Amino acid sequence: DRRSRPRRPKPLATAGRALKHRSSVLVSLVRHVPAPVVPYEPRDMSAIPEVWVTMAKIFATMFATLGALGATLTPARAGTRVAARGGAGAGWLCDPSSNPSKYHAEVFILKVSACWIASVGVVIALGTYEWWGRWGYMAYCVTCASPYVLVPLFAPLAGDVVRGKGARGKGGVAAVSVKPLGERYIFKANLWIAVFSFIGNYWYTHYFYGVLNAEYTFDAHRLNDVPIALYFMTHAYFMFYHVLSNCALRKTRATFKKNQRRFFFECALIAVMAYSTAFMESLTICGFPYYSFKDRDMAYTLGSAFYGIYFLVSFPMFLAIDENAKRKKTYAATFWEAMGSGMAVLCLLDFVRLRLGLDFVM
């Protein structure tokens, strides 16, 4: 009878149950099998360039020293925090009410700097300098530097526009006048940087040629064997650097009580900013192939210290221009202070050259 016969399981169902059983056995075995132990192999430190290890040690030492000195500072009382002797406020920039000329000039410099820095990034990334030629370099560098001079000259900054309190012009509108050129901070800032950067290019560059065996190899108009385009580009760089240093030093003076500990902290801060600024410029310019060094590692370590000597003098000297709103400098005093700062840097560079036992060739 067909009804009494045992039903045979279907072949696919049997195979499926067998596969499921085997899978469960394998899973149970895997759960009980310990993972293989992989022996620890220390990372090969030789893969990291030695210069980066050296730079890490240098920066770690500098910032550790700065932090230790900062821990000894005494915060200034809220009522005595001043950003400048002539004005109140504890910001990074000058107080706009007591020193509007310097406040608006520094804001303007930061805005212009952001524009040309972005353009440098685009130029390096695209490599457009490859087809410029000497006139192309000149046009680009003049374009980067000229806004600092031309814009305030033809469109005076807000801090240099004086509105009469009582006098009224046509239509009952308050009379407006513009400060004389020699009284504007932006004019004195440009004058100081122009003098200092000219001395730097004309004289200091040859120390880089002799000490670091640096060389500019692109086609350019030259003055004293230094590309003239770089005289203009240095102006743009230095305007940016020195406004940043102004902000840092002003914030320190506004936040902490004036005493001997703050003096030592400021000295350390200037040294750290000087070395960091020099190193960052050396690092970023490495993407430009026509500024070469015989030993690039030495350019990062020794070269940054050598270049940083510029800023050891210039950062505090540049801050002093019209920082006291009640005792502003004349443009003549600004010029001679820039000349004196340039001579101080030249002496320091030559002292280092003598210590290294190198001949000065120009």
Image: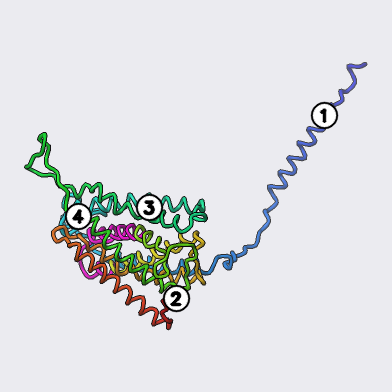
Residue for badge 3:
143
Residue farthest left in this picture: 166
At 33% across and 65% down in the image, what residue appears?
197
**Which residues make up the magenta segment?**
237-265
Q: Given this view, does label 2 or label 1 mark the residue nearer the observer?
A: 2
Tag 3 secondary structure: helix
Residue for badge 4:
181
At 43% across and 53% down in the image, what residue appears?
120
Across and down, in percent, residue 58 comes to 43, 69
Q: Given this view, does label 2 or label 3 mark the residue nearer the observer?
A: 3
The residue lying toward the viewer, choosing from 122 and 260, is: 122
Q: CA distance from mark 2 to mark 1?
A: 87 Å
Q: Which label's residue is closer to the chain start, 2 or 1?
A: 1
Q: Which label's residue is closer to the chain start, 2 or 4?
A: 4
Q: Quadrant of the C terminus?
A: bottom left
Residue for badge 1:
12
Tag 1 secondary structure: helix
Across and down, in percent, residue 23 comes to 75, 40
